[in-house]
Image (cartoon, grey):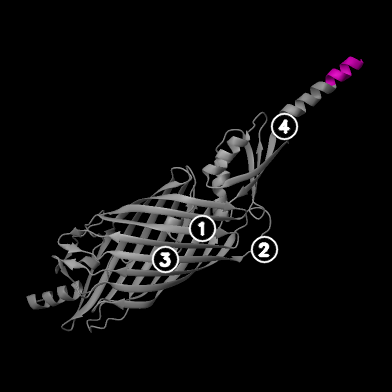
Amino acid sequence: MKKIIIISLFSLWTNFAFAAGTQYDMRVDGLACPFCAYGIEKGFTKTEGVKSVDIDLKNGLVIVKTEEGKTFTEDQLKEIINDTGFTMKSMTEKPI
Amino acid sequence: MNIRSISLIAGGLLSLGVCVSIQAAPITFNTALPVGKDEFILRQQFMLMQSGDDNTGANRDRTEYSSMTAAVYGINSRLSLFGVLPYRDISLSMNDTGQKVNRGSEGIGDAQLFGRYIFQQNNTKGATLRLAAFTGIKIPTGKNDHNDSLGKLPAPVQSGSGSLDGFGGIVITQQTLSYQFDSQISYRLNTEADNFRVGNVFKLDASLQKRAWPDRLGNGVPMYLYGVLESNLVYQGKNKTNGVSDDNSGGTRLFISPGLQIVTRRWIAEGGVQIPVLQSLNGTALEGKYMLRAGIRVNF
């Protein structure tokens, strides 16, 4: 019985762990107007696996949430940001 | 109408001096448009240009309605390609020996194709500084052989120039969360077409856009309302016909343009009025009175 409970709990945990995507919080320099912000949004939304993009102009933040299984390396994020004419200063990631 | 009258009219129109190429920069210049890799911006502007008082007594009155379509594509984060195509409706009326004469043309104007390369960019939190160079050509896509009952229309009333011209310049942009400042210097070298050559043009433009609303930024990407003030200095050399300078053409103009912009993520709506504050024109060249501009830009 104990074994069944442990296995069930383990299955439940792995389902949650791998069903969730990843959230990337990036500090981006150069963001100064709404019209410019769309470039970053487009740069991410055209990438497969991106679920949502939120931008906070005042704090220079770009928050990207991905779908299950989709991850980015720091270099990939930097490249997407650079292609839109901005500069990524820092990045943190966490599971959603 | 006798031959003498036609000659007088033709002479008066040739001395008009309102050069088709004097069009100072619109509310924020095309060359300052921000565009990233694989990004596409479409800009549509509508303009009304009205000439001012005529000091020759011929009561020349020139009005131009035009529509300008500009498309920009980002090759990469530094290099962008621009295409600009105008549509023009020009009318001119004047008195000749007591008779009022009306002449005009309508059609596609001369297109512009140019590239811009950002060679210096400095991004900081909530701000950016860009320095770019641009160069391109004006292509004679407009007709320069419109005719009416009096014969071929003079150059200032044609929708096109017939000439292939080159231009280039430098543009700088400083942008923060509160304001944007653009400035550009440019030069256009005009060539001859059908024995007529428009004087070369030197321009110095500056534009300040100040966020008027919201007063304080909240979270997210809010809509902005910008107040805009531009200044445009234009120097044009004398036109030449058959190699002979027209002493009643060219000169220096300084414009001031107050305006407004509504800025969102996907589109910008803008409008303003361009007023000449200084016009030092050669001879009997016709002065401008005002120019109204309104337009929209969309991000794709």
Marks 4/3: CA–CA distance: 52 Å
Please determine if labels 4 and 1 lie on a single subunit: no
Tell me where the magenta segment starts and ends, as one range.
Answer: A1-8
Which residue corresponds to mark 2?
Answer: B216
Where is residue A25, by image quadrant? top right
Q: Which mark is residue B104?
A: none
Q: Up-down: is B67 above or below A27?
A: below
Judging by the rendered image, the residue that carries numbered circle 1 is B268
Q: Label 4 amino acid?
A: Ala
> Could you give the CA–CA distance between mark 4 and mark 2, rounded to whole angstroms?
36 Å
Task: Give the CA distance from mark 4 to mark 1.
Answer: 37 Å
Horizontal arrangement in the rendering, residue B110 relative to residue A31 (left or right): left
The answer to whether mark 4 and mark 2 are in CB contact below 8 A is no
Q: Nearer the viewer, mark 4 or mark 2?
A: 2
Relative side of B205 to A39, left or right: left
Which residue is denoted by mark 3 in the rendering?
B205
Instruction: Same chain for labels 4 and 2? Say yes or no.
Output: no
Which secondary structure lies at badge 1?
strand
Of all chains, the one bearing label 2 is: B
Are the residues flagged by discs 2 and 3 in contact, CB closer than 8 Å?
A: no
Above/below status of A20 relative to B58? above
Mark 1, Cα crowd under 10 Å, few <14 / some 14-19 / many 20+, is many
Residue that mark 4 sits on: A20
Q: Regarding mark 4 in the picture, which secondary structure is present there?
A: loop
The amino acid type found where label 3 is placed reads Asp
